[in-house]
Image (cartoon, rainbow, N blue to C red):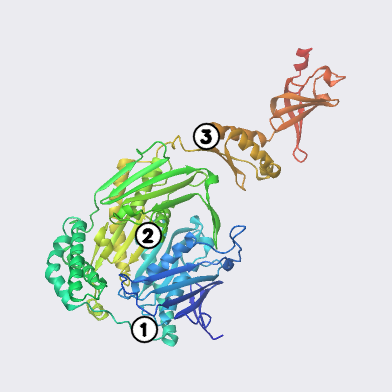
């Protein structure tokens, strides 16, 4: 085996790139090792063009293997890995969103990047995967304008309980919400940022900007590391000639379509007008070519001419004239509508949120601890008590298509909203419910993911979930002038405009989709995607401030509809009661083979969940939950010496009598403790079924024996019976 290694210290640990001939058929491959986490990244490009394809075909797959964690997972009958986990889908999206802007989008050869997790320890394989994918592409012959670096950075509590920034913290810290203030995965190039995934506990915008600056320093080290490797072993890049649009087609476009485009784009919301114009152009171009070039079937280049021109007009008008397609100011939010509840009394909570032409319905369902989602992944095995699922049906964008299939985008948007809302949920000790939110995108015209956060906040508050604070989200856009590196050196900084609440054409043609969610006090989640190679941190800092202004307006509208969570949950939601028992009594409640707890469930109809620490939850209708709670309290009650009680005599013996103290506990009254006078036979004065007062005089916990006395409870009890 041929082998060459390169190393770099990052975050206090060695990052090692291992190049071998293991995957020698791939155009680029590398194994990247960090601690004992190892990933293999490969990059391939098809030999032939894919004619007729109107987009750049990039596929990114992050592949989990359970052997990486030393696990044999799956069902009893199927042990092979199945469909990608949610973690794998989200990791694939992070890699894709980082790599895609650095490709020439006119390429019509298919490119595929596969990252396989070979081994995993406490280090984050996703961050390693991004860097490995970058390096595999960079050393390959595939045209790509990298390399790019990726780090995970967060503000964590240290041993002195003060906060400090840590690079590439281990999973044990990352998965503990109490350990960090904010946690960001950041990718960038040449001092700019092109991808962010972040969660935060209501962190100030300026603090996040400083964190991005620190991340950029570490990213620079990773870039230089990769550039040195490329210089030494990188392959010469393939030259892919661009197709040139026929000059006659350009002439046709300029004469018949271009004069109408500005008016169509800026005609109110513009969508119908521009769609109509696009249809006319497609028809005109095809008719023109069908006459002059009957053998040609590919009109993608003409479509690109239309789109590129629309893109240029939107950029020029925004940057030079502060003009947007729908006539709004740069920092203006579209019309808002908020509704909490009012759909059906069957639902546990619901919210409807409009932001312009983007409309979302979110529905809350509450369940007991037994309804938690068990996650059995490559790295983690845990129960989730909060889930947010996002659906984007075809009708949402006025189209037809496949329904009922969850795609990567839906998984990603659902996870982003879940991340934003999780930061304000009450702890399980305060609100032990399992919570599931489903957001249905009903109409889409820009950032349904952020509208989902707003609608879900309304649903949570309508459902009586005592959240810390309402959360709102907004999507920020960017129009930045395209200049060469030489121009950048002279001009220092390109001209740009930041757009609040991007819609339709601004989302499609803009240079940035910067989603920021948070409360009045700070940010809870961030997601950044770009169409340029990267965005300066200074611009992102300004966008964060502008996003906060928009967020406050949205929160004003939400709180105008519902100022605080409702005092009570829906009467249709299950009731949950909770008690705490000693851990050593758990076995007593469960019984041999689960017999006792099963009997209680059958008798009451309530669900019973017992945690390892002795916390017991009773879920069901109020009466059934209360009855189950009473039974377990009786079952686990501890009697203390000196207690005065009353019980039924259930058995008589020569030496005394047994008295039932509750449904699960009996105590024994010795013959000498029955009365203050001499008794020849127990049966002379006491009978089964008799109710007698007793005092607890001894408790033997090891032998589970309780000694009782009637005469100490009431010396005259049997005198009255005589």
* Left-right relation of 442 to 294: right
Front disc: 2 or 3: 3
Q: Secondary structure at mark 2?
A: strand
Front disc: 1 or 2: 1
Q: Position of residue 87 (x, y in %)?
A: 48, 61
Q: Secondary structure at mark 1?
A: loop
Label 2 and label 3: CA atoms lie apart by: 39 Å
The residue indicated by pointer 2 is 526
Q: Quadrant of the N terminus?
A: bottom right
* Left-right relation of 176 to 596: left
Q: Position of residue 546 (x, y in %)?
A: 28, 58
Q: Nearer the viewer, residue 195 or 89?
A: 89
Q: Is residue 420 above or below residue 233?
A: above
**In which image quadrant can residue 703 be found?**
top right
Label 1 and label 2: CA atoms lie apart by: 36 Å
Kindly identify which numbered label has been placed on residue 1: none
Label 3 and label 1: CA atoms lie apart by: 68 Å
Neighbourhood count class around disc 3 (C-alpha, 10 Å): few under 14, some 14–19, many 20 upward:
some
- Total marks drawn? 3
Front disc: 3 or 1: 1
- Say which label, 1 or 2, has the lower sequence index: 1
Q: Is residue 413 above or below residue 578?
A: below
Q: Nearer the viewer, residue 581 or 299?
A: 299
* Left-right relation of 245 to 644: left
The residue indicated by pointer 1 is 238
The residue indicated by pointer 3 is 621
**In which image quadrant can residue 266 be found?**
bottom left
**In which image quadrant can residue 343 be found?**
top left
Q: Nearer the viewer, residue 457 or 378?
A: 378
């Amino acid at each position: 085996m041929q082998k060459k290694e390169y190393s770099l210290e990052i975050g206090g640990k060695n990052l090692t790139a291992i190049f071998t001939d293991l995957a020698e058929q791939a155009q680029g491959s590398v194994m990247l090792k960090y601690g004992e986490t190892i990933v293999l990244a490969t990059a391939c490009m098809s030999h032939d063009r894919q004619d007729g394809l109107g987009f750049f075909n990039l596929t990114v797959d992050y592949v989990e293997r359970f052997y990486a964690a030393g696990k044999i997972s799956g069902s009893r009958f199927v042990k092979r890995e199945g469909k990608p986990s949610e973690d794998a889908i989200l990791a694939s999206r992070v890699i894709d969103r980082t790599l895609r802007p650095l490709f020439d989008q006119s390429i019509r050869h298919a490119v595929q990047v596969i990252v396989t997790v070979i081994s995993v320890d406490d280090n984050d394989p996703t961050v390693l995967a991004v860097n490995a994918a970058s390096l595999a592409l960079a050393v390959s012959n595939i045209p790509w304008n990298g390399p790019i670096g990726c780090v995970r950075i967060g503000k964590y509590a240290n041993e002195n309980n003060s906060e400090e920034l840590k690079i590439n913290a281990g999973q044990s810290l990352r998965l503990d919400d109490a350990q960090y203030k904010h946690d960001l995965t950041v990718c960038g190039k040449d001092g700019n940022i092109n991808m962010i995934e972040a969660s935060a506990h209501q962190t100030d915008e300026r603090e996040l900007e400083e964190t991005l600056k620190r991340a950029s320093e570490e990213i620079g080290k990773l870039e230089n590391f990769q550039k040195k490797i490329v210089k030494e072993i990188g392959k010469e890049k393939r030259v892919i000639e661009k197709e040139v649009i026929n000059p006659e087609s350009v002439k046709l476009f300029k004469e018949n379509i271009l004069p109408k485009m500005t008016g169509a784009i800026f005609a109110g919301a513009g969508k119908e007008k521009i769609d109509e114009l696009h249809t006319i152009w497609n028809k005109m171009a095809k008719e023109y070519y069908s006459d002059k070039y009957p053998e040609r079937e590919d009109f993608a280049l003409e479509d690109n001419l239309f789109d590129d021109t629309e893109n240029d007009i939107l950029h020029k008008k925004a940057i030079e004239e502060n003009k947007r397609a729908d006539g709004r100011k740069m920092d203006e939010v579209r019309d808002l509508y908020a509704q909490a509840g009012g759909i059906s009394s069957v639902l546990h909570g619901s919210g409807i949120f409009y932001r312009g032409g983007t409309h979302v319905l979110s529905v809350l369902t509450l369940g007991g601890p037994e309804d938690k989602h068990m996650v059995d992944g490559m790295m983690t095995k845990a129960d989730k008590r909060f889930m947010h699922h996002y659906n984007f049906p075809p009708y949402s964008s006025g189209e037809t298509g496949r329904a009922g299939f969850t795609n990567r985008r839906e998984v990603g948007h659902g996870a982003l909203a879940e991340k934003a809302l999780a930061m304000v949920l009450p702890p399980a000790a305060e609100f032990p419910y399992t919570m599931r939110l489903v957001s249905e995108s009903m109409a889409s015209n820009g950032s349904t993911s952020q509208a989902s956060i707003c609608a879900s906040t309304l649903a949570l508050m309508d459902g009586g979930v005592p959240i810390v604070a309402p959360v709102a989200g907004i999507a920020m856009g960017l129009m930045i002038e395209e200049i060469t590196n030489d121009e950048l050196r002279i001009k220092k900084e390109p001209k740009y405009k930041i757009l609040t609440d991007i819609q339709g054409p601004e989302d499609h043609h803009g240079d940035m989709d910067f989603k920021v969610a948070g409360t009045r006090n700070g940010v809870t989640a961030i997601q950044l995607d770009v169409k340029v190679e990267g965005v300066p941190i200074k611009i992102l800092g300004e966008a964060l401030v502008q996003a906060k202004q928009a967020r406050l307006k949205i929160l004003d509208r939400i709180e105008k509809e519902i100022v605080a969570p409702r005092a009570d949950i829906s009467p249709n939601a299950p009731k949950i009661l909770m008690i705490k028992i000693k851990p050593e009594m758990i076995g007593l409640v469960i019984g041999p083979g689960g017999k006792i707890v099963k009997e209680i469930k059958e008798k009451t109809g309530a669900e019973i969940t017992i945690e390892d620490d002795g916390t017991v939850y009773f879920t069901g209708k109020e009466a059934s939950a209360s009855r189950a709670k009473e039974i377990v309290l009786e079952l686990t009650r501890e009697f203390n010496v000196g207690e005065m009680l009353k019980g039924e005599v259930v058995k008589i013996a020569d030496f005394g009598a047994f008295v039932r103290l509750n449904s699960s506990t009996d105590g024994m009254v010795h013959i000498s403790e029955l009365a203050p006078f001499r008794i020849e036979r127990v049966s002379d004065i006491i009978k089964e079924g008799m109710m007698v007062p007793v005092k607890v005089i001894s408790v033997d916990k090891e032998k589970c024996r309780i000694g009782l006395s009637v005469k100490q409870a009431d010396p005259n009890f049997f005198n009255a019976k005589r």
